[in-house]
Image: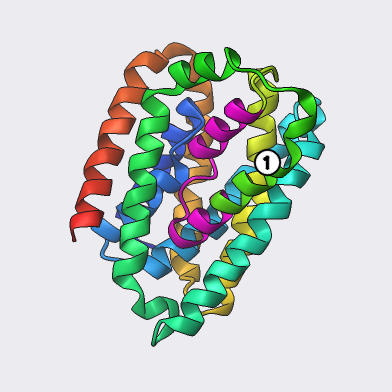
Amino acid sequence: MDLAQIFSGFAVGAIVGITGVGGGALMTPLLVLLFGVAPATAVGTDLLYAAITKSGGTLVHARRGHVDWRIVGRLAAGSLPAAVAVLLLVSALVPGGLGAAHRTIGFFLGFALLLTAAALLLRRRLQSWARSRRRPAGDRAWPTVLAGAALGALVALSSVGAGALGVAALFFLYPGLAAIRIVGADLAHAVPLTLAAGLGHWWLGSIDWPLLATLLVGSLPGVWLGSHLAPRIPERVLRPVLAGMLVLAGGKLISA
């Protein structure tokens, strides 16, 4: 196992444990820019990595009653078909399949990183704006399905968006819902989405299993440590730093 990859997994896991976001947004560009992993392989490997690491958090939220399964079902009704459809389209239309779509996947990865950085920086303003424009309860089903479809397509191509962008979308759609239930629903939805997209990448041959195992060796203790450090580190310091890193990585990937 590569010690640098183990350490990278530990560092990303610690950031996820402290901030609750940043897994795919940091891990995938790290694999591409630092370790030279092909974009399709980095995305596919990170998707299965996310499905495994987020399962534990989902179980905790579910046991505490923080998951609104109706919202999860609506998101999944849009995201799962969209993720599968996007992967099939890319594999069918791009000569050589996902492995040859380096520029396309790199562009979508960079775009998703910039969107995630904006969501991190503007989170509180977005929440306030959404709460000031509450909608009637009956008009949220189809918008939630459509939001899920957009997330599914983006996550399948970039592995980024299931966290910060999913939370931002739910704050817009359900401004009256408690923040902990929004986080719980977003986390629960991320598990089947990343699993389905990751299995699609596996079927198309873009998973590096030894790399996945190496990342998990570092990230699982990192998440545990970060979760314990979270109360001691001010979020107002971490979020701008994380957003700045995402902007730099996203700009580099788009211009590559």
Q: Position of residue 144 (x, y in %)?
A: 68, 41
Residue drawn where x is 70% and y is 38% of the image: 58
Q: Position of residue 227 (x, y in %)?
A: 53, 26
Q: Amino acid at mark 1?
A: Thr
Residue drawn where x is 41% and y is 82% of the image: 94
**In front: 198, or 17?**
198
Q: Is residue 155 left or right of residue 84?
A: left
**In front: 109, or 237?**
109
Q: Is 152 part of what is drawn in magenta?
A: yes
Quick check: 31 above or below 128? below
Q: Is residue 26 left or right of residue 76?
A: left
Residue linked to disc 1? 144
* Corner quadrant of residue 123: top left
Q: Which SS class for mark 1? A: helix
Residue drawn where x is 39% and y is 78% of the image: 99
Q: Residues within 10 Å of mark 1 (few under 14, many from 20)?
A: many
Quick check: 108 above or below 223? below
Q: Which residues are magenta?
A: 151-173
Q: Is residue 225 left or right of residue 139?
A: left
Q: Is residue 34 left or right of residue 2?
A: left
